[in-house]
Image: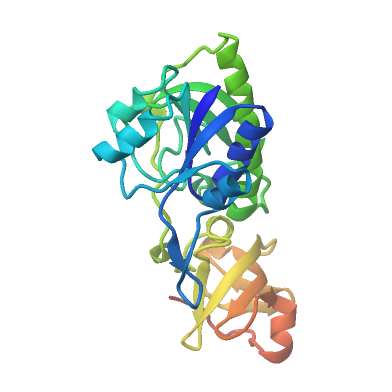
Amino acid sequence: MRIVFMGTPDFAVPCLERLLADGHEVTLAVTQSDKPRGRGHQLQPTPVKVCALAHDVEVYQPAGMRSDEAYERIARELPDLIVVTAYGKILPQRILDLPRHGCINVHASLLPKYRGAAPIQWAVINGESESGVTTMQMSAGLDTGDMLLKRRCPIPPEMTGGELHDLLAEEGARCLSDTLKALEAGALHPIRQDDALSCYAPMLDKSLSAIDWGRPAAALHNLVRGLNPWPSAVALYGGKKLKLHRTAVGEEYTDAPPGTIVKGNPLTIACGGGTTLVLREIQAEGTRRMTAEEYLCGHPLPTGARLESE
């Protein structure tokens, strides 16, 4: 098929690569503008742009999708289908209606749950035991289109948001490939989403990072996992930030006040309801990420001391 691909971050790259590997004619890759990154704030291309140019696919980076110029540029490609994976902008109805097969989106959740910008991370934060990807026929709403195919993936209790992201990026490419094969065979059977079963997964920001030690350890463990690698869960010790990268729910209970260090080996913190959280990997201000044992060799945290919320 003749396809226009729309995507921006790392998550979208396997889908673009799979379309090309399956022999589809991807005539244009639409992605967001280059953005300044790193300490030098130099403009960096999006991962989709890098991938597209490596495969000699023309790249288009409009400021928005509602202009006549954007519509006319995409219309010139005469696409059979537009495939959208984490593009990051809402498409107007006239673009949705442009291809003869419409627009298909690859979404990183088992719709209708976790519509929105950060479905992967919120599934982990909320302690879900399963996630997956859904392809859907796009409509004007936010992730509200008819569902096409799904691929399910378990979420192990130690898996981080970053690890689930990488897994679902590959599963999304496989689900997209299966979806287009079914489309070409006339074997797709769209299923309408039940809005009553939906929930929203808003974009992450640093306001979520603060650890509230009054919460149960299991909830804090899920928060740490879901915010890894960004923006990271954060506590305070001595007025300085301590990022928590890896944790485990402790096996012992305590009557110590929440936030109290109750054991040094392994580094164990009192949480709400008498539960405890074991810190596995941490990062203090001005240091690299390291295991708790490595950190304690040069930075003692005495039993009975308190970690605070940011």
Q: Residue 26 versus residue 217: which sits nearer the camera?
A: 26
Report the side of 90 relative to 249 (left or right): left
Report the side of 45 relative to 157 (left or right): left
> Looking at the picture, how far across and down is residue 269, in whole percent?
60, 72
> Looking at the picture, how far across and down is residue 225, in whole percent?
59, 57
Quarter occupied by residue 158: bottom right
Q: Residue 285 versus residue 157: which sits nearer the camera?
A: 285
Instruction: Establish if 278 lies above or below 56.
Output: below
Instruction: Establish if 126 lies above or below 258.
Output: above
Instruction: Establish if 217 lies above or below 184.
Output: below
Residue, x 50% and y 58% (percent of image)? 45
Where, quadrant-wise, is the N terminus in this rendering?
Answer: top right
Quarter occupied by residue 55: top right
The answer to whether one can see residue 253 in this image is no
Residue, x 31% and y 46% (percent of image)? 64
The answer to whether one can see residue 110 in this image is yes
Residue, x 51% and y 33% (percent of image)? 27
Report the side of 228 relative to 300 (left or right): left
> Looking at the picture, how far across and down is residue 47, in whole percent?
55, 53
Q: Residue 27 versus residue 192: which sits nearer the camera?
A: 27
Where, quadrant-wise, is the C terminus in this rendering?
Answer: bottom left
Quarter occupied by residue 144: top left
Report the side of 114 relative to 149 (left or right): left
Residue, x 40% and y 27% (percent of image)? 138
Q: Residue 80 versus residue 184: which sits nearer the camera?
A: 80
